[in-house]
Image: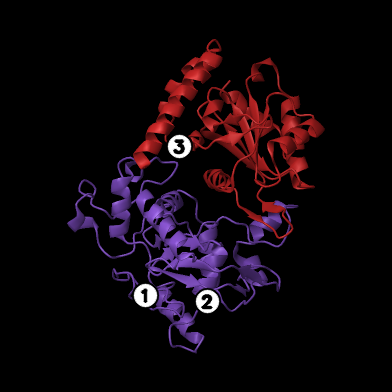
């Protein structure tokens, strides 16, 4: 039984990756993706190989971000106070971007696997005016727990459905290694930009 | 494992009954309790669930590692366990059952490894509330609530405690062994904030875990042993391993 499942899974994966390569054959980043994944550093958070859904409903793995500098945090969209401030902090950083930052991605991972569907995330991105370089990710409770643990972000769901959570943002290098983290809200953009610029 | 599940499924269909408590697990009845750190008076409800009667042993864990080599001391990735992972197993000879497979609780395991083990067993790690609720039960045949405190005090004050096998300290009234007295245990949501506040201010959140404020918010400020346990959990990270930290698994009771 297990063997059959493994074989089927393997076949699906093979056909899927073949498709993916066909689909994106000509972009420089995609041709190296598969090789690089094998060589991910042991401490890369991209070692977590969960499937997430972005705000367009597209299934992605964190390792798909390989090759891009990343600024990442965790939020939930029903959050009325802290999360909009966090998003605002990130927008402040983005407002100081120049041409050399064109490959940098912003990644917002939601704590709220029940309410933050891709549709809801898409709506939120619209309201917040988040551009194409912003990824909002929806996943299940288990993968949210695991990413929170590698990021060392404490959180708890409250009875009213909201989340109490730490506010932290991270700068990741092209391989998903955490280069810098910053706690708090209404923080200065400079340290983040400095960490980012070191690798550009 | 798959076969086992199929057999269980067939059995439950044939009998038309809920799955019985699994071997080596006991049912913890539904209830409510007042968590140590809530900063308020409200109780937390816990649904009935199954809990392993003893902690996972070195023998159990060796079986898991042999079947899942990505969790072996040689293959484990640093993101999922620090360099002390299974450091008490002989470095080049951990496969040797006579060296490794004993009935002592497995320690030096990370949350990720513990979580993967429980999933492999078709179980899960207990939540913090489940663990705390089950741990409140007094020793079997005891009516004296001081007995638990005494077990804890003698455990905390023991120096270089000798190695002990699981099922050797005390059994509580649910039939669960050694919730205290052997090794600390991972829970699924050890990094939960445990704060009644919203996410308005990071200071409020951080304060739930640490020294002064934690004892002020504690539901029973004299409960020093619980304070140590909560502080300890707050100091952990998912890939940490230590020689005093093991785990046991839980399972939800499925409704039909």
Task: Determine which residue is flagged by label 2.
Answer: B136
Q: Which mark is residue B158?
A: 1
Disc 1 crowd rating (10 Å Cα; few below 14, some 14-19, many 20+) is few
Q: Looking at the colours in the rendered structure, which chain would you say is drawn in purple?
A: B
Residue reaching furthest front? B14
Q: In terms of secondary structure, where does tag 3 sit? A: loop
Q: Is residue B129 visible?
A: yes
In the picture as drawn, the residue positioned furthest to the top comes out as: A26
From the top left corner, tell me how far across and down residue A162 is, in percent. Answer: 72, 53
Q: Residue at x 47, y 17 (%)?
A: A32
Q: Quadrant of the C terminus of chain A?
A: top right
Mark 2: give few (<14), some (14-19) or many (20+) Cα within 10 Å.
some
Which residue is at a point 41% across and 50% down the rendered structure image?
B113
- The shade of chain A is red
- Asked whether the residues under the numbered discs 1 and 2 touch, taking CB atoms below 8 Å apart as contact, a structural biologist would say no
Task: Tell me whether marks 2 and 3 sit on the same chain.
Answer: no
In the image, B220 versus B8, the foreground residue is B8
In whole angstroms, how far apart are the C-alphas of marks 3 and 1?
36 Å
Q: Which residue is mark 3?
A: A43
Q: Identify the subunit bearing mark 3.
A: A
Q: Quadrant of the N terminus of chain A?
A: top left
């Amino acid at each position: 039984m297990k063997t059959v499942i493994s074989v089927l899974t393997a076949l699906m994966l093979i056909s899927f990756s073949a498709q993916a390569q066909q689909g994106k054959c000509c972009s420089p980043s995609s041709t190296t993706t598969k090789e690089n994944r094998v060589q991910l550093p042991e401490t890369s958070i991209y070692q977590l190989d969960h499937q997430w859904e972005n705000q367009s409903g597209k299934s992605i793995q964190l390792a798909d971000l390989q090759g891009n500098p990343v600024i990442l945090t965790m939020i939930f969209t029903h959050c009325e106070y802290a999360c909009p401030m966090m998003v605002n902090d990130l927008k402040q950083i983005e407002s100081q971007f120049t041409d050399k930052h064109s490959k940098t991605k912003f990644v917002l991972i939601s704590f709220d696997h029940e309410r933050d569907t891709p549709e809801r995330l898409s709506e939120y991105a619209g309201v917040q005016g988040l551009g194409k370089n912003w990824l909002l990710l929806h996943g299940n409770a288990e993968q949210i727990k695991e990413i929170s643990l590698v990021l060392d972000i404490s959180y708890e769901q409250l009875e009213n459905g909201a989340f109490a959570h730490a506010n932290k943002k991270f700068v990741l290098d092209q391989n998903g290694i955490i280069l810098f983290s910053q706690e708090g809200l209404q923080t200065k953009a400079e340290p983040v930009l400095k960490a980012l610029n070191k690798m550009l | 494992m798959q076969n086992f599940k199929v057999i269980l499924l067939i059995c439950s269909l044939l009998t038309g009954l809920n799955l019985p408590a699994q071997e080596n697990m006991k049912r913890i009845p539904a209830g409510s309790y007042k968590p140590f750190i809530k900063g308020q008076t409200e109780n937390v409800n816990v649904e009935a669930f199954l809990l392993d009667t003893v902690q996972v042993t070195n023998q159990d864990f060796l079986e898991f590692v042999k079947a899942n080599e990505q969790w072996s001391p040689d293959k484990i990735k640093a993101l999922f366990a620090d360099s002390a992972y299974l450091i008490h197993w002989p470095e080049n000879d951990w496969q040797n059952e006579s060296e490794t497979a004993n009935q002592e609780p497995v320690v030096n395991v990370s949350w990720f490894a513990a979580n993967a083990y429980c999933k492999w067993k078709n179980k899960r790690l207990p939540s913090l509330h489940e663990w705390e609720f089950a741990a409140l039960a007094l020793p079997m045949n005891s009516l004296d609530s001081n007995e638990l405190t005494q077990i804890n005090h003698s455990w905390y004050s023991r120096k270089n405690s000798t190695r002990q096998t699981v099922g050797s300290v005390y059994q509580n009234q649910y039939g669960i062994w050694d919730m205290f007295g052997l090794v600390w245990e991972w829970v699924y949501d050890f990094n939960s904030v445990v704060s009644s506040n919203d996410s308005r201010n990071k200071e409020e959140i951080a304060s739930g875990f640490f020294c002064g404020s934690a004892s002020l918010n504690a539901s029973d400020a004299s409960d020093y042993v619980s304070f140590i346990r909560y502080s300890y959990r707050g100091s952990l990270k998912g890939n940490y391993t230590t020689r005093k930290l093991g785990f046991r698994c839980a399972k939800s009771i499925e409704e039909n």
